[in-house]
Image (cartoon, rainbow, N blue to C red):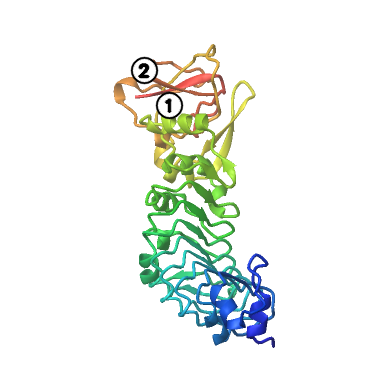
Amino acid sequence: MVKLSVSLLCKSTSNLKRRKIDETPEQYLKQITHVYLNGKHLEDVGHEIFLCKSLKVLYLYENLLKEVPELSCLSQLTHLYLQNNNIERIERLSELKNLQKLFLSRNRITVVEGLEGLTSLQELRVDHQHLQPGEYLLFDERSIAAISETLNRLDVSGNGLETLEDLVPLRSLVYLYASNNQIGSVTTLIACLANWPELKELELQGNPVLNKPRAKDAIIVSTKSLEVLDEKPIPVPTRKFLESWNQCRGIRVLASALEAPVRTISTSQNSEISVLGIPEDARSAKVLQLTELSNEPQSGEHTVTSEDVEFKAPLQKKLEENGSVDWISCPLTLPSTEIVAPSDRGEARKVPLHIIAM
């Protein structure tokens, strides 16, 4: 076991601040702002660290620590790096009022707790904890409430999470990394996203939820401030189109519809169309109101269901047995290349068209 000593501390400082010949170790350490103790095989950090009265940044990652060191005397500390250790519990941090960044990735933490005193915390990384099979990371309500106004960057990736509901109070989130979890419900996810009005970057890759049809479209529409999804910028034209699409009554991409499976139905013209699964009570509903405008240059593929349409009796039209459509016209249009028929009809055809909202 390597034990922290005054000599090791003096050797672990920045080269920008060299010790003067006439300085004692204590005098030198009192002025130090950065200490690099990463990868030193440390199992404990003794009271020698208290000599660094001006310490702002402490690197302790990739050691053998089993608990958070006692650092209460380091009142000026702003950055603490403790990732890649064997820490099992978050504690002894309540006195660090100026702490802005706390890195605890790849430890053995099961509960995010002990953050009540961190009133300046802006970034927290607790991703990829070494949990037992079937376990998932838990969040203490008091700790989440304590950092709800200041935390803007959070990484909870790889922790077996099935939902982000415990993070809803974090209304100042700007960057959220939640990849490689077990998040599966589009409905619940969208409800959570509505609570983060400043969210700009979101990572969800590796979650079952992204296997749902049109899930990413629904996420983009439900987060007005989002700029990057899974490391890919969201083009402005894409957002504008999806928002316009969503605003049209009757053809909104609803979360409930996204939970349904995708099916393909053939057409009388040997074409195919992918459609969301339609509930039993909607299978006999009238077909969507459509109008054929093949000369329009803008088009795109968009899947909707009869469940998503608010039908109005005077304007309902059925798909004829031969695949033809009686067209109607309405004031508001959106481009698409697909038509969707009730699933108990034999065939539908895929043509350039406009879907009409009512």
Residue shown at 34% from the left, 24% from the top: 358
**What is the secondary structure assignment of the residue under circle 1?**
loop
Is residue 285 shown above or below 113? above
Which of the 4 quarters of the picture holds residue 62?
bottom right
* Nearer to us in this view, 181 or 197: 197
Closer mark to the observer between disc 2 and disc 1: 2
Tell me the kind of residue under disc 2: Cys
Provide the residue designation for mark 1.
288
| Above or below, comparing residue 156 to residue 341 in the picture | below
Image coordinates of residue 50 in percent, x first then y, are 52, 82
- Residue 61, by quadrant, is bottom right
Say whether residue 3 is left or right of residue 136.
right
Mark 2 → mark 1, Cα distance in angstroms: 12 Å
Query: Up-down: is 33 above or below 254?
Result: below
Which residue is under mark 2? 330
- Can residue 352 be seen here? yes
Q: Amino acid at mark 1?
A: Leu
Callout 2 secondary element: loop
The reply to whether discs 2 and 1 touch (Cβ–Cβ < 8 Å) is: no
